[in-house]
Image (tube, grey):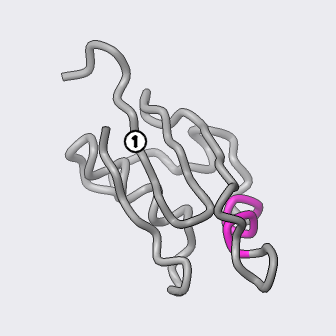
Amino acid sequence: MHRARHDVDGSEPISVTVIKAVARAIEEDPLELPPLRDAVRVDLDALDDLFVHGPEGRPSPDTCLRFRYMSHTVFVYGDGRVSIRRPPGYD
Protein backbone atom coordinates (compact mmCIF):
# COMPACT_ATOMS: atom_id res chain seq x y z
CA MET A 1 0.00 0.00 0.00
CA HIS A 2 1.28 3.44 -0.90
CA ARG A 3 0.63 6.27 1.55
CA ALA A 4 0.68 10.03 1.19
CA ARG A 5 -0.28 12.96 3.39
CA HIS A 6 -2.35 15.94 2.30
CA ASP A 7 -1.54 19.26 3.94
CA VAL A 8 -4.98 20.18 5.26
CA ASP A 9 -3.73 23.70 6.01
CA GLY A 10 -2.16 24.18 2.57
CA SER A 11 -3.65 25.65 -0.59
CA GLU A 12 -3.39 22.53 -2.78
CA PRO A 13 -6.74 20.76 -3.25
CA ILE A 14 -7.06 17.16 -2.05
CA SER A 15 -7.78 16.08 -5.64
CA VAL A 16 -4.27 17.16 -6.65
CA THR A 17 -2.77 15.23 -3.73
CA VAL A 18 -4.69 12.13 -4.85
CA ILE A 19 -3.42 12.41 -8.44
CA LYS A 20 0.18 12.82 -7.24
CA ALA A 21 -0.13 9.90 -4.80
CA VAL A 22 -1.52 7.54 -7.44
CA ALA A 23 1.15 8.64 -9.92
CA ARG A 24 3.88 7.84 -7.38
CA ALA A 25 2.27 4.49 -6.56
CA ILE A 26 2.23 3.40 -10.20
CA GLU A 27 5.46 5.22 -11.11
CA GLU A 28 3.90 7.43 -13.76
CA ASP A 29 3.99 11.15 -14.48
CA PRO A 30 0.85 12.75 -12.98
CA LEU A 31 0.31 14.64 -16.24
CA GLU A 32 0.07 11.32 -18.11
CA LEU A 33 -2.83 10.03 -15.99
CA PRO A 34 -6.42 10.39 -17.18
CA PRO A 35 -8.28 13.25 -15.50
CA LEU A 36 -9.68 12.13 -12.16
CA ARG A 37 -13.01 13.77 -13.02
CA ASP A 38 -13.41 11.58 -16.12
CA ALA A 39 -11.87 8.37 -14.80
CA VAL A 40 -13.99 7.98 -11.69
CA ARG A 41 -16.84 10.39 -12.41
CA VAL A 42 -16.05 12.38 -9.32
CA ASP A 43 -17.12 15.99 -8.94
CA LEU A 44 -13.72 17.42 -8.03
CA ASP A 45 -15.23 20.54 -6.49
CA ALA A 46 -17.36 18.35 -4.21
CA LEU A 47 -14.34 16.17 -3.36
CA ASP A 48 -12.23 19.19 -2.50
CA ASP A 49 -15.07 20.79 -0.51
CA LEU A 50 -15.67 17.59 1.45
CA PHE A 51 -12.13 17.72 2.77
CA VAL A 52 -12.11 21.45 3.49
CA HIS A 53 -15.39 22.12 5.27
CA GLY A 54 -16.31 20.74 8.65
CA PRO A 55 -16.39 21.91 12.25
CA GLU A 56 -14.37 25.09 12.51
CA GLY A 57 -13.57 24.93 8.79
CA ARG A 58 -11.63 21.68 9.06
CA PRO A 59 -12.62 18.25 7.80
CA SER A 60 -13.75 15.69 10.33
CA PRO A 61 -10.96 13.18 11.04
CA ASP A 62 -13.65 10.49 10.78
CA THR A 63 -14.36 11.34 7.13
CA CYS A 64 -13.29 8.62 4.70
CA LEU A 65 -13.95 8.39 0.98
CA ARG A 66 -13.05 5.32 -1.08
CA PHE A 67 -13.02 5.02 -4.87
CA ARG A 68 -11.13 3.25 -7.66
CA TYR A 69 -8.72 5.04 -9.96
CA MET A 70 -6.20 3.48 -12.34
CA SER A 71 -7.26 0.02 -11.08
CA HIS A 72 -6.19 0.99 -7.55
CA THR A 73 -8.40 1.58 -4.53
CA VAL A 74 -7.94 5.08 -3.15
CA PHE A 75 -8.80 5.96 0.45
CA VAL A 76 -8.94 9.64 1.43
CA TYR A 77 -9.27 10.46 5.13
CA GLY A 78 -10.33 13.70 6.79
CA ASP A 79 -7.03 14.01 8.65
CA GLY A 80 -5.12 14.25 5.34
CA ARG A 81 -4.07 10.63 4.92
CA VAL A 82 -4.28 9.20 1.42
CA SER A 83 -3.77 5.46 0.92
CA ILE A 84 -3.47 3.71 -2.43
CA ARG A 85 -4.09 -0.05 -2.46
CA ARG A 86 -2.84 -2.02 -5.43
CA PRO A 87 -5.14 -4.57 -7.04
CA PRO A 88 -4.35 -8.26 -6.52
CA GLY A 89 -1.64 -9.45 -8.90
CA TYR A 90 -0.40 -5.94 -9.69
CA ASP A 91 3.36 -5.90 -10.29
* Residue 49 colored in magenta in the image: yes
Task: Identify the residue at image location x=26%, y=52%.
Answer: 24
Q: Quadrant of the C terminus?
A: top left
Q: How far across and how far down the image is residue 6, in percent?
A: 46, 69
Extreme residue in the right direction: 55
Q: Quadrant of the N terminus?
A: top left
Asked whether, in this view, residue 88 is left or right of residue 14, the answer is: left
Q: Is residue 72 above or below residue 34?
A: above
Give SS at disc 1.
strand
Q: How far across and how far down the image is residue 5, in percent?
A: 40, 65
- Number of disc labels: 1
Where, by quadrant of the figure, is residue 17 drawn? bottom left
Q: How far across and how far down the image is residue 20, in percent?
A: 36, 59
Q: How far across and how far down the image is residue 40, in percent?
A: 62, 38
Q: Is residue 46 above or below residue 23?
A: below
Asked whether, in this view, residue 55 is left or right of residue 74, the answer is: right
Where, by quadrant of the figure, is residue 8 drawn? bottom right
Residue sitting nearer the eye, 43 or 77: 77
Task: Identify the residue at image location x=69%, y=47%.
Answer: 42
Which residue is under mark 1? Answer: 84
Q: Amino acid at mark 1?
A: Ile
Q: Main secondary structure of the magenta part?
A: helix
Asked whether, in this view, residue 26 is left or right of residue 73, the answer is: left
Extreme residue in the front direction: 62
* Residue 86 colored in magenta in the image: no
Task: Identify the residue at image location x=51%, y=79%.
Answer: 12
Asked whether, in this view, residue 66 is left or right of residue 81, the answer is: right
Q: Is residue 37 above or below residue 12?
A: above
- The part of the chain drawn in magenta is 46-52
**Within 10 angstroms of label 1, few (less than 14), some, or many (20 or more) residues?**
many
